[in-house]
Amino acid sequence: MEFWSLFMVASMPVLQVLIICLLGSFLASSRINVLTTEALTNMNKIVFAVFAPALGFAAIVKSVTFKDLISWWFMTVNLGIIVFVGAFLGWIAVKILKPRSHIRGLIVATCATGNFGYLPLMVVPALCNEKGNPFGDSSTCYTNGLAYVSFSTAVCDFNEIVALTIVYSSYFFTNLNNIFFATF
């Protein structure tokens, strides 16, 4: 019985996201057409450029102190280790599969980053309902947990920016090498 109650608590955030996605898909469908392609593009830009960072920084500012940032040192080290291991596994996949040269950097970067930094978004709300959670009693758990998740997401976003920069530069230099070698 304990498994099913834990399963229900852990699946509720996922179910909420799925319901919102279904509602968005319904509103954007050609039958309803409330959200046009242009509206979706503009909303997507606003959400990722304004609302998501604002939510993250607001959560961090409310409850994170410098002492918390120092005590969460393991998060940045953990994410760094995951990025290096993922990049190494991506490099091995590129060597084994031998894809075209213009997508090799993309494969390595995708394996390096993935979505690992967003996993706490699902786990922390489920942990707050359990006794003995690492974020304190239930009254402060959501505040501390949200700050932890926001910091995790910020570190993950930084890692993804670095990985995408590596992909862009590898794609640029691959094309530059192809142009250079094609002329000689």
Image (tube, helix red, strand yellow):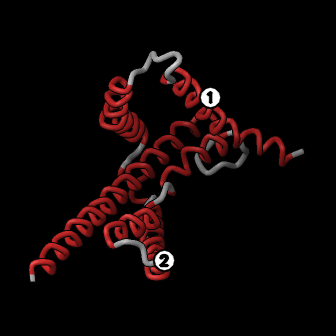
Q: Residue at x 18, y 76 (%)?
A: 177
- Residue placed furthest toward the left: 184
Which percent across, then down, holds residue 175? Answer: 20, 69
Q: Quadrant of the C terminus?
A: bottom left
Category of crowding for the residue at label 1, using alpha-carbon neighbours closer than 10 angstroms: few (below 14), some (14–19), many (at least 20): few
Q: Quadrant of residue 121?
A: top right
Q: Residue at x 58, y 34 (%)?
A: 17
SS label for mark 1: helix
Decide: is 20 above or below 114.
above
Along the line of sight, which residue is nearer the eye, 58 or 107?
Answer: 107
Which numbered mark, 2 or 1, is in the foreground of this view?
Answer: 2
Alpha carbon distance from label 2 to label 1: 37 Å
Q: Quadrant of the N terminus?
A: top right
Query: Which disc is residue 97 wearing?
Result: 2
Along the line of sight, which residue is nearer the eye, 137 or 111?
Answer: 111
Query: Which disc is residue 161 wearing?
Result: none
**Left or right for 16, reference 29:** right
- Residue placed furthest toward the front: 183
Query: Which disc is residue 19 wearing?
Result: 1
Amino acid bearing label 1: Ile
Q: Residue at x 14, y 73 (%)?
A: 179
SS label for mark 2: helix
Category of crowding for the residue at label 2, using alpha-carbon neighbours closer than 10 angstroms: few (below 14), some (14–19), many (at least 20): few
Along the line of sight, which residue is nearer the eye, 35 or 175?
Answer: 175
**Left or right for 151, reference 8:** left
**Left or right for 94, reference 101:** right
Amino acid bearing label 2: Leu
Which percent across, then down, holds residue 137? Answer: 64, 40
Which percent across, then down, holds residue 16? Answer: 62, 31
